[in-house]
Amino acid sequence: MSIRTAALLFVAVSPSAKAQQPLPGYGPQSAATERAIETDVIKRPSPASASGHSRALSKETHVAGTPAQATTRDYVINQMKSWGLETEVRSYDIWMPHPTAVHVSRLSPQPKELSLREPSVPGDPTSSLWQYPTVNGYSGAGEATGEVVYVNYGLIEDYAQLDSLGISVRGKIAVARYGRSFRGIKAREAEKHGAVALLIYSDPQDDGFVVGDVYPDGPMRNSSGVQRGSVLNLDGDPSTQGYPSRQGASRLAADRLDVPRIPVVPIGYGNAAELLRFLRGAGVPRGWQGGLSFRYHIGPGPVKARVTVRDDRATSPIKPIYDTFAMIRGSQFPDEMVIIGGHRDGWGPGAADNVSGTVSVLEAARAVAEAVKQGARPKRTMVFATWDAEEWGLIGSTEYVEDDSLRLSRGAVAYLNQDVAAQGARFGGGGSPSLRGTLRDIARLVPDPNGKGTVYAEWRRGSALPDSAEPAMGDPGGGSDFAGFYNHLGIPIAEWGFGGAGGVYHSQYDSYAWMTKFGDPGFQYHATAAKIAAAMMLRLANADVLPYDYVEYARTMRRYVTPLERSAADRKWNFPMTGLRSAIDRLEREAASFNAARDSVLGTSASTQQLQRVNASLLRVERALTRPEGLKTRPWFRNLIYAADEDNGYANMVFPSVNEAIRSGNEELARAELEDLTRRFEAAAQAVSDARSALRAR
Ligand SMILES: [Zn+2]
């Protein structure tokens, strides 16, 4: 999955830079070498080769835990080996029930069994192959019968509105539309309010005919298209929370897992209309009417339905998953690692989600491997990973991060994520503010496939910005494989991709045919995502001093203080933020003087040992903004800067430890959390200061 929830920020730092500016973190000599390598490497990813990988990896539905998914593992490993890379596969055993039967029937009026399968369409060969049943990952199993109630998006505030109308879903089947929140939150709220089953449908207003022509005539969702997807509100295997699910690991019993208990089934708007059209009772409040061609009602009833989900949890719930790794060992700083990854599993053929990201990782690996053969050995270790079972709850990446946490905490310089790297022409990027400058620099280097300029220039043009502003970049919220690296360990992350019409998300129609017709017909954007990937990897792997920008980081943080102050004031708390402000100010000051000192030292020759000490201090900066005990609400989430909003799942929350305390109304806790966060910013500033001292010491 990938839903980028960008808090739209306009960063008023240096406007478009000139071509031959110094490379941050590089001395003049190594900068010249690096420029030459990057110029070479970005020529290597090719649309033809991307198209070949895409066709091979999307030839069938490859859900985690199925034999088809083991085939994609072998494909990736064989390709990586053929380019001379060292490879490794890590397997984990995951509690992951697969369905054996899924049914939805209307019992009244006019009994009718709904046809759940997505029918085959002309011109799309994979649409007629085996498909994964339309059920949400980690749905409860069982059979439920009841009257139907329409709950809008199934948000917390929607249930509050139902309460105020005197309508309860207790004992009923809730029907919610997709959008505005992670589907796991919809399942949690429906169950909490007593619903016996939940149907989640794709409203045509969201990604169907209201938005554009539907597949196969257009890219948008047709009436039978279904958005599958997990309803797990955890990261990683629910039976081994916080530790890797290696073979033989001890596990929570099935009845103690934090997973939905009620059946949760996704349906298309054709089937949703079969239920919603006959609902009566209360008319819908403002904003609840969707795009179907009748007046919506809430119910309950008179429509009655039955939802059945059977699965293999009693017989074979544990399934192996496989992460793949390809490595190039660093020549100068072998213990420092730059990692790129994308998930390899999907809900259907998955040409966009996430064959496109896997292809970007593959093509970047090929480009870098070829450059290395020409003699350009990287200074740091590079890792090209693909993750399994992302779609079920970021499972493959989470198990790996838990497995290798010590090595990653110590040595991971950055994690770059590729989830839906190409399904259109509109560039978007984001991540930790410390890496945004590097991503912008690389976007200035890579030509846009439309031939009019660089990716950066097109990105700016598409954003309609005032002169001094940079294009908006997304904050790390939730929803993809960077979470383990970022939220759990505090490793800086970046992500990017080319977006477009997303009407086949998580359906059988996310296929090679859809991609060649609508998403990226020439595979130019796949190749371009890979060019950015290859150059990003090299830029981070070859720098003498890690090119993090803690000036931009501090400036970004400062903008969050006023809203924080406001939410405390809304509670009528007298909450001075002067301490936090001055800690952030200090971080910016230290970073500015570090940058100046770095540039002058890199003009001379520094020893490897000295650079190692500088980099070791820099690696501590964002780690200092995590804490071992994590958030009060979610101990696994150790990063105190960004986290997914617990009540939404996709939306991003800044300074979550403080903001959650304010939301809970606990003034004493909020005050303690603010002090804690302030201390951690002081420690981050100190780490930058230590890096500067290390620059001076000879
Ligand atoms: Zn995805």
Image (cartoon, helix red, strand yellow):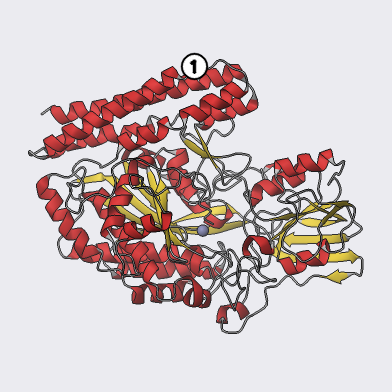
Q: Is residue 661 above or below residue 545?
A: above
Q: Secondary structure at mark 1?
A: loop
- Residue 430 position within the rendered picture, expressed as x and y whole percent measured from the top left: 41, 48
Determine the residue located farthest toward the bottom in the rendered image.
122
**Viewer-nearest residue: 678 or 571:** 571
Is residue 328 visible from the viewing direction of this image?
Answer: no
- Residue 684 position within the rendered picture, expressed as x and y whole percent measured from the top left: 34, 28
Mark 1 is surrounded, within 10 Å at the Cα level, by few (under 14), some (14 to 19) or many (20 or more) other residues, namely few
Instruction: Give the side of residue 481 with respect to residue 589, left or right.
Output: right
Instruction: Give the side of residue 433 with respect to residue 653, left or right.
Output: left
- Residue 288 position within the rendered picture, expressed as x and y whole percent measured from the top left: 75, 52
Q: Is residue 671 above or below residue 94?
A: above
Identify residue type, mark 1. Answer: Pro
Q: Is residue 328 above or below residue 504?
A: above
**Viewer-nearest residue: 52 or 398:** 52
Q: Is residue 288 above or below residue 113?
A: above
At 76% from the left and 72% from the top, the residue drawn is 115
Residue topped by disc 1: 576
Image quarter hosting the C terminus: top left
